């Protein structure tokens, strides 16, 4: 864990909770599994446009974007949430990939006017859920609202109570909680937020799964993270060819598995009905609640809804399609 969100919330008077997920709102979530990469300078937009799947030109102070960085082979290195505040771009992405992404982007800076930083101390980050409709909370997914001049709030997809990411200063965070009124002064762990991401069908890469899938195999096309109208970017040739020729062989699905086995992203899927021992997919994300695993899996399209699909090493437990 990056351990960036916890001290920020502690400074606001919050205490860590052991609760796996909150059933009340407002609820606050630690995001130590995420980091913030900031890009500033007059060439920052051009650099990002040439490296990301989303159309960076669409980002504004009122709209954030889901996107990804890909290898030259068109495989997803990392997903991210892109915000624009004034002349600065902020990318919220997995903490264990932040350093490698930063180094990768710096390779393309050359003499361009771009400054890249990882999680500047002035920036705080946390998630929260709130089912109230208020003028300071955005109403639509990825809609972004400036808050207190030096902060932003982004609404994210959710299957339960509306949820949001806050990014900004300590003073702005304090002002937000004053507006929200009385809240439980405990914050949920990062795993609880990852659980909500899984339920919402939002994939996240780890160092073990980075460069495992093309974007379409983990639904980044249907999630709006790919622009097929923008210019060239790293990996674009393969991604565009797959799109226009309709040759996507796999897609991502939310499934469950009742088991006490240890499941980790990257494990392969197999089917008892398959004529060969070849894998039919992989685990993208895996979160356990009690004895049930909530999984995002990338599966070959011809195997969707097939029975008797198991995860490598766990032949007696079969996934359940939702």
Image (spheres, helix red, strand yellow):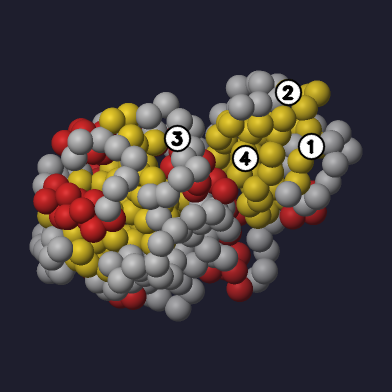
Farthest bottom residue in view = 229
x and y, in percent, of residue 133 in the image:
39, 67
- Residue designated by label 3: 191
The CA span between labels 3 and 2 is 23 Å
State yes or no: discs 4 and 1 in contact (Cβ < 8 Å). no
Which sits earlier in the primary sequence, circle 3 or circle 2?
Answer: 3
Q: On screen, 183 above or below 161?
A: above
- Secondary structure under the numbered disc 2 in the rendered image: strand
Residue 116 visible in the picture: no
Label placed on residue 309: 1
The CA span between labels 3 and 1 is 26 Å
Which sits earlier in the primary sequence, circle 3 or circle 1?
Answer: 3
- Residue designated by label 2: 314
Which sits earlier in the primary sequence, circle 2 or circle 4?
Answer: 4
- Secondary structure under the numbered disc 4 in the rendered image: strand
Query: What residue sits 46% from the left and 45% below the top?
Result: 24
Residue 94 picture quarter: top left
Query: What residue sits 44% from the left and 58% below the top?
Result: 131
Residue 53 picture quarter: bottom left
- Residue designated by label 4: 295
The CA span between labels 4 and 1 is 13 Å
The CA span between labels 2 and 4 is 15 Å
Which sits earlier in the primary sequence, circle 1 or circle 2?
Answer: 1
The CA span between labels 3 and 4 is 13 Å
């Amino acid at each position: 864990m990056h351990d960036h969100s916890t001290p920020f919330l502690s400074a606001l008077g919050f205490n860590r909770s052991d609760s796996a997920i909150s059933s009340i709102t407002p609820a606050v979530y630690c995001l130590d599994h995420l980091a913030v990469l900031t890009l500033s300078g007059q060439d920052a937009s051009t650099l990002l446009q040439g490296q990301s799947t989303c159309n960076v030109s669409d980002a504004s102070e009122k709209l954030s974007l889901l996107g990804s960085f890909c290898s030259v082979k068109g495989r997803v290195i990392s997903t991210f949430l892109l915000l624009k505040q004034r002349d600065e771009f902020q990318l919220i992405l997995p903490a264990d990939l932040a350093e490698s992404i930063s180094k990768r982007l710096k390779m393309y800076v050359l003499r361009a006017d771009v400054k890249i930083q990882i999680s500047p101390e002035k920036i705080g980050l946390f998630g929260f859920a709130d089912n109230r409709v208020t003028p300071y909370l955005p109403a639509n997914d990825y809609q972004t609202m400036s808050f207190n001049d030096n902060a932003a709030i982004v609404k994210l997809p959710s299957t339960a109570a509306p949820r949001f990411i806050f990014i900004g200063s300590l003073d702005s965070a304090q002002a937000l909680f004053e507006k929200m009124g009385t809240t439980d002064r405990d914050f949920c762990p990062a795993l609880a937020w990852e659980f909500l991401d899984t339920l919402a069908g939002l994939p996240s890469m780890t160092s073990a799964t980075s460069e495992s899938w093309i974007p379409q195999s983990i639904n980044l096309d249907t999630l709006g993270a790919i622009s097929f109208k923008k210019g060239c970017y790293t990996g674009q040739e393969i991604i565009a060819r797959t799109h226009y020729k309709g040759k996507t062989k796999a897609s991502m699905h939310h499934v469950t598995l009742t088991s006490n086995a240890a499941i980790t992203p990257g494990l392969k899927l197999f089917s008892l009905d398959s004529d060969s021992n070849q894998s039919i997919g992989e685990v993208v994300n895996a979160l356990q609640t009690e004895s049930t695993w909530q999984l995002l899996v990338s599966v070959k399209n011809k195997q969707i809804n097939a029975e008797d699909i198991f995860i490598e090493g766990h032949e007696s437990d079969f996934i359940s399609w939702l």
